[in-house]
Image (cartoon, rainbow, N blue to C red):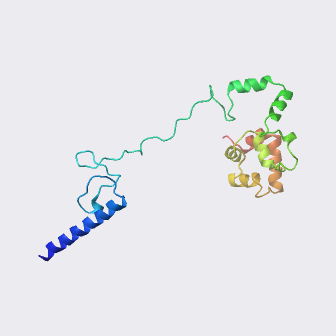
Amino acid sequence: MGGLAMAEVGSVYVEKVSQALDQKGSRRSDKPHSGPPWSRQSSLMRSNGAGLPERQPNVSKTTTTAKPRETRKGKSDKYGMTAADWARLEAMTDAEVLAAARSDPDALPLEDRRPGSVGPARRVSLAKRIRWGLRMSQTEFAKAFRIPVGTLRDWEQHRREPDQAARAYLEVIARDPKAVIAALRPPQR
């Protein structure tokens, strides 16, 4: 009998809460609701008519960004220019190229910039100049002339300077790289 009394008290409480919500106008629908306020369907779980909640659409597999449009015809190179762009540039005289560069305020030629706006030119190491002249990668250069790659990187990045013997070796490489490679080749039997 005590359990029945609690159920009646609980239903009276639910009715009073429902009436209070109706008076404040915070009820989500005009339909009468039988049951406690926490049992109402949330706006995220709408019914599909069969009493089951509708599934939210799965948007994880859909793209939200548009596919970028091709703005130019033809293939561009590492500088972003097509063959037609290069042909147009090569057809221009030096004066026309300079005039075109000066017309772009965001990319002024070095001659026209304020002297303090451009930092000092970085010094290029002897090892890097020689390697660039031979058109070799660091790995190729190091392997061909038997210099450790780490040492070559240190020289090129100015972390270390080559000692006198290494500088002499680099000078010999610069003067006659083929002879140095031939001298370093193992003898044939």
Work out which residue is located at the far bottom of the displayed protein and give it.
2
| Quarter of the image where the C terminus is located | top right
Task: Name the image quarter holding residue 100.
Answer: top right
Count of marks, rendered view: 0
Q: Foreground: 93 or 138?
A: 93
Q: Position of residue 18 (x, y in %)?
A: 29, 63
x%, y% of residue 168? 83, 50
The residue that appears at 27% across and 60% down in the rendered structure is: 39
Residue at left offset 85%, top offset 28%: 94
In this rendered view, identify the residue nearer to me: 19 or 41.
19
Of 186 and 163, nearer the camera is 163
Q: Residue 103 is drawn in which quadrant?
A: top right
Going by the picture, which residue comes out furthest to the left?
1
**Location of residue 10 with respect to 55 vertically, above or below:** below
Q: State left or right for residue 164 relative to residue 38.
A: right
Q: Quadrant of the N terminus?
A: bottom left
Placement of 98 over or under 7, stated as above or below: above
Instruction: Pinpoint residue 188: horizontal percent, then vertical percent.
Output: 67, 40
User: Which residue is at 67% across, 28% downward?
Assistant: 82
Residue at left 27%, top 45%?
A: 48
Q: In this view of the protein, which residue sits in the foreground, 183 or 80?
A: 80
